[in-house]
Amino acid sequence: MTTETTEPTTSQDTAPAAPTTTDPDAALAAIGARSIPEFAGVHEVWPRGERLRAVREAAAAYKVRFKEQGQVTAVRSVDIAAAPYPVKYAFHDAVAVPTLPLISMVNRMIVVQYDDFDARPRTLVFEPTVPDGSARAPFYSNLQRLVEKVPGGGLLERFAVRYYNEPSDVLDVVGLRPEDVDFCTFDHLHVQDPRMILGSSAVIEGESAPRPPLFGDARMLVHRRELATLESMHPMQWAWYVEEGLDGVDPDRFVTFDTDIELGPGIALLWTPGHTDGNHSLVINTPDGVWVSSENGVALDNWQPELSRIPGVRRYHEALGREIVPNANTLEDSLDQYDSMVKEKTLADRSTRDPRWLQILPSTELVDWKRFWPVVPTFRHGGISYGTIRPQR
């Protein structure tokens, strides 16, 4: 297993070793990234109505500068797997007609290539979910045991689960090798097992040898609060995290940050707390404008309920005067999540396919399978692709 802590090399140069300093600005500078000043302090503004206004205004100001800086080189999404999810969580109990208790959502991995602020070409993979790791989260392991006990449970599993590609297969699809990847990240670490991505010196239960890293020397970008949650979980958080997910993982494989950061022209990770304390959203600038990806919602209906045809979602918006409907499996802080989704809406541009809809791509998106009608997305992007992904080693 590789335990090298230096930055991955590129075809142009060799990046400096990761600094041992705890200075967050120095840590970001070492990977060609920097913090975003427009958002400094907005999440501490009080009272809460003023905070929402501050978040919206900061997002609008940053969007101007973000778009002026340039675009990413290339981006492509590839589906990994579809998994079941409770309807009551997906739309905060807004669905107003009898339905199946579970719908299905597709997780996709997004590969982004960009130049950092030191002009080094970089490759980032967003949401490289390993299904075997997600199955270790208590919510899904308990659901699996329940399905096994119910008559016809196997049929239910076939009804809601589908596998497309493992993260390593996605690299083959886009023409990359593991050593081409510089960084990986998740919007948050619900049902993610970092050992499956970064490797582990400890043997995972049920396996016979230590697991090697999936993407060579790639490091994981993670908000400091999200990593801390995995290190010490509250009982209200426990069901959604893989409790042993850090066992044997070299801590130097993580690059942590405390706020909103931009990785290079056209790519940023915005801190969007609420769904989890350390949630962050991928924001990229493309030839069609700005896209945002996170799991604050599972469909565009969550961000634009006024356009939704899912029974009850528009009524939720109208009755409560809320411009979003959150993905609400945890509700660690629903007010923060509301503000974060407004932050995302403000950054996203309008779709070129249908300008009514924003370019928000849920990192795990509600399927449009007829078997789940009427809980199907009113409008669905289904993926994203710009430019050509190329090996950089």
Image (cartoon, grey):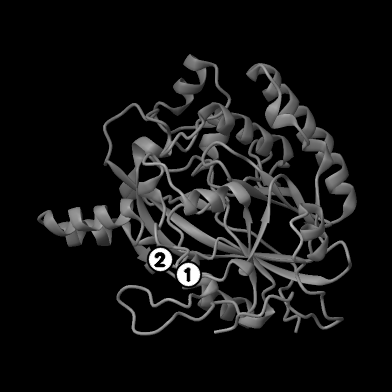
Of residues 165 and 242, the one drawn nearer to the viewer in this rendering: 242
Quarter of the image with the C terminus is bottom right
- With 66 as the anchor, is 113 left or right in this view? left
Q: Position of residue 121 (x, y in %)?
A: 81, 72
Taking the view exactly as shown, the residue that stands out farthest to the left is: 151
Q: Is residue 165 above or below residue 104?
A: below
- Residue shown at 48% from the left, 69% from the top: 195
Q: Is residue 266 above or below residue 360?
A: below
- Residue shown at 69% from the left, 39% from the top: 355
Q: Position of residue 377 (x, y in %)?
A: 47, 42
Marks 1 & 2, CB-CB < 8 Å contact: yes
- Image-quadrant location for residue 157: bottom left
Of residues 303 and 217, the one drawn nearer to the viewer in this rendering: 217
Mark 1 vs mark 2, CA separation in Å: 8 Å
Residue 195: which disc? 1
Local SS, label 2: helix
Local SS, label 1: helix
**Looking at the image, is mark 1 or mark 2 nearer the viewer?**
1
Q: Is residue 95 visible?
A: yes
Q: Position of residue 146 (x, y in %)?
A: 18, 53
Q: Earlier in the sequence, mark 1 or mark 2?
A: 2
Q: Pointer 2: what residue?
A: 133
- Image-quadrant location for residue 158: bottom left
* Amino acid identity at mark 1: Arg
* Amino acid identity at mark 2: Gly
- Image-quadrant location for residue 16: bottom right
Q: Position of residue 15 (x, y in %)?
A: 82, 75
- With 372 as the anchor, is 116 left or right in this view? right
